[in-house]
Image (cartoon, rainbow, N blue to C red):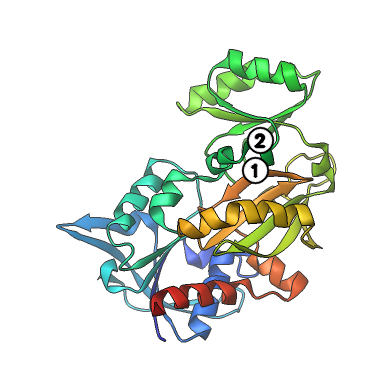
């Protein structure tokens, strides 16, 4: 099976080829004989009934500083591709949402991964709300009085933007902190979105586990340990990845959420687990494939392509 693959992602020329999951997915596709076309989200367009993209055919290699060769720039009709990857990083803003609407017009005849309708409806910090018994105490609100009342109940909390990513704008406010009103003023002055607050989980000192699921099934996990004196464990924020296995609690969480992810076309998902609690279900642009492969020898990219090829063959 030879598939035509389009990658909608941030500029591929600047990715860290030893960490970026999209690069690993694309490299595996190329090794399996599939062709690759790359474009950035700003080059996606709807033109007179067709979903078009302007970009480049590419060839990849694992060579730092020389990892991509571009073919001639061209404009393509994405309906003529077998698979389109929706892989640009958040923030999950109206630009991101618009791309999901456009890609939805060609799906599922062209398989868009992950399914753009459900990426739009299930962004990471919102899908967890369907599983309140699996998550720490959580509130989503813009109203300061509601957030203050939540903090009064739980004392030590995490406050962060609802549609942020990579650990940006994440604050821990303990029982003695006096900055809630100032932070609320800052966030609400930047946009009209709500904030998310969760009870602080001390277990984060031992790490924030990223469990990777392919078509609803867990294939492994990595642990992300925060730097000394830091609350955030995201690798973008300096978290240190470590080898770790799946616990019975991890498998219990995956058994609960996996069928929904599979039903909604979320082929590649990364969930975040702190201690025994599910904190996020990442469907927009999850990471962790290369770290998992280094630690466990698990080729998650191959598992992803096996799932996609089976869907295309069906």
Q: Residue furthest left?
A: 48
CB within 8 Å, label 1 to label 2: yes
Q: CA distance from mark 1 to mark 2?
A: 6 Å
- Which residue is identified by label 1? 167
Residue of label 2: 170
Instruction: Indicate the quadrant where residue 113 lies.
Output: bottom left
Please name the residue shown 27% across and 73% down the image.
80
Residue 10 visible in this rendered orientation of the protein? no
Q: How many marks?
A: 2
Are there few (<14), some (14-19), or many (20+) residues within 10 Å of tag 1?
A: some
Residue drawn at (73%, 72%), measured in percent from left and top? 294
Q: Which of the 4 quarters of the picture holds residue 279?
A: top right
Residue at screen point 50% across, 48% down: 90
User: Residue pushed farthest top?
Assistant: 145
- Name the element at disc 2: loop
Asked if residue 2 is positioned above or below residue 257 in the image, the reply reads: below
Q: Could you say where residue 270 lies in the image, as x and y percent from the top left?
A: 61, 56
**Nearer to us in this view, 314 or 18:** 314
Helix, strand or loop at disc 1? loop
Q: Tell me the quadrant of the picture where the N terminus can be found.
A: bottom left
Residue 314 spot, x, y in % from top left = 39, 77
On screen, 174 above or below 110? above
Mark 2: few, some, or many residues within 10 Å (few <14, many ≥20)? Answer: some
């Amino acid at each position: 099976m030879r598939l035509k693959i389009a990658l909608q992602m941030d500029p591929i020329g600047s990715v860290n080829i030893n960490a970026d999951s999209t690069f690993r997915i694309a490299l595996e596709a190329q090794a399996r004989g599939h062709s690759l076309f790359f474009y950035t989200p700003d080059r996606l367009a709807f033109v007179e009934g067709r979903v078009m993209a302007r970009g480049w055919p590419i060839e990849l290699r694992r060579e730092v500083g020389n990892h991509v060769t571009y073919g001639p720039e061209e404009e393509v009709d994405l309906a003529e591709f077998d698979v389109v990857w929706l892989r640009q990083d958040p923030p999950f803003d109206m630009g991101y949402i618009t791309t999901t609407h456009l890609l939805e017009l060609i799906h599922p005849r062209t398989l868009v991964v992950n399914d753009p309708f459900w990426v739009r409806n299930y962004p990471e910090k919102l899908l967890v709300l369907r599983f309140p018994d699996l998550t720490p105490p959580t509130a989503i609100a813009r109203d300061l009085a509601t957030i203050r009342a939540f903090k009064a109940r739980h004392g030590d909390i995490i406050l962060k933007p609802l549609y942020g990513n990579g650990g940006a704008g994440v604050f821990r406010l303990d029982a003695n902190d006096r900055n809630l009103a100032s932070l609320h003023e800052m966030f609400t002055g930047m946009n009209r979105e709500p904030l998310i607050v969760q009870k602080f989980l001390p277990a984060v000192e031992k790490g924030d586990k990223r469990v990777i699921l392919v078509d609803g099934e867990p294939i492994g996990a990595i642990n992300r340990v925060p730097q000394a004196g830091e609350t955030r464990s995201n690798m973008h924020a300096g978290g240190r990845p470590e080898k770790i296995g799946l616990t019975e609690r991890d498998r219990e969480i995956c058994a609960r959420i996996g069928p929904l992810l599979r039903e909604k076309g979320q082929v590649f998902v990364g969930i975040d687990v702190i201690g025994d609690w599910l904190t996020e279900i990442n469907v927009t642009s999850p990471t962790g494939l290369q770290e998992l492969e280094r630690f466990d020898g698990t080729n998650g990219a191959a598992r992803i392509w096996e799932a996609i090829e089976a869907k295309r063959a069906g």
